[in-house]
Amino acid sequence: MEGDELLVLIVSALVALGGVFSTQTLSLHRLYVERNAGIGLSRLSVLLSLLWVLFVIFFFADESVRGIYVLFYMVMAYAVIKVLGQVSVRILTFSLRVDVYERRNLAAALVVSSFTLATGIIFGCSLWGDADPLSGSEGGWWIPLGFFALGWSVLVGLCFLFIWRDPNPVRTRIRQDRSLGEGFSLSAFILSSSIVIGDAVSGHFLGWSESLLGFGAIVGMLIFHEIVSPRPSLRRHGTAPLRLSEALGYLFLAVLSLIAGWVINNYVLGIFS
């Protein structure tokens, strides 16, 4: 391990430690913690994120990611998952401590947990593939980190569009009304977007087709949301079937983009190569 890598490892460990202190529950009264399903969801999202990153490292990452570098990227992953996944969700006006820990808001917990898991999905996918499949030379830690930063920024931008384009603020319905339907819908959008973004930042760089197709699918999700989003007056009378169909629509578009990308890169582009 070289000098800059050791420095990055130390910084990642310090950032991760700061994330732990920011999200710990030791200072809370036991009444906030007992039977609080939201805390369990938030912890599960961190665990699933780390398992995903570990899975990618062992089966799909560059061959140079072995030995001490497994620890290197796992510490980095834990840092970004805790800080950018759990703590930084505040930029979307949701708070892990206030909404999930103190107010026991399960709808908000769905959003925070999905955003945390989406962060882990994108980081894991940024480690997917060879650093330089053409020449066989080893890459560096800045390559997956750069792709992760790009993908995570797109995720945040999409969340802003989803939340602030709604005429009846979805954040209000989730934080104040505790609407599980709205929380489920936004969570499905976040996770579906992370799947498409993860596909865009993963793998070997063989051209722009995969990335453009993936981001095009995300635009399709936003258009779909605008079409099926009911009027504010309808939301107060219960629209569970519609919210479920919206969530399934996001997942369908995400899976469709993955299939289309595979077909284009394995068959269509092969005809012109």
Image (spheres, helix red, strand yellow):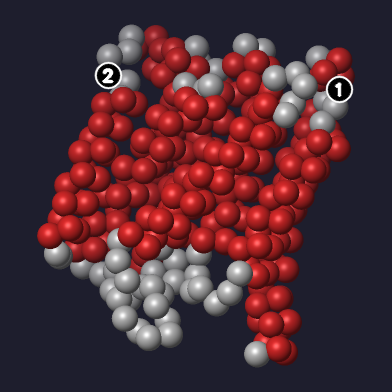
The residue positioned 56% from the left and 24% from the top of the image is 108
Disc 2 designates what residue? Answer: 26
* Residue 232 in sight in this render: yes
Hey, what amino acid is under mark 1?
Arg
Q: Quadrant of the C terminus?
A: bottom right
Q: Quadrant of residue 98?
A: top left
Give residue 253's quadrant in the image: bottom right
Check disc 1 and report its element: helix, strand or loop: loop
Q: Is residue 263 above or below residue 273?
A: above
- In the shown orientation, is residue 220 left or right of residue 32? right
Who's the residue at 60% across and 45% down the image?
Answer: 191
Determine the image quadrant of residue 57: bottom left
Position of residue 53 measured from the top left corner of the image (x, y, whole percent): 40, 56
The secondary structure type at the circle numbered 2 is loop
Q: Residue at x 53, y 22 (%)?
A: 93
Q: Which residue is mark 1?
A: 231
* Label 2 – label 1 distance at C-alpha: 42 Å
Q: Residues within 10 Å of mark 1 (few under 14, many from 20)?
A: few
Q: Nearer the viewer, mark 2 or mark 1?
A: 1
Give me the residue at 68% from left, 23% from top. Answer: 170
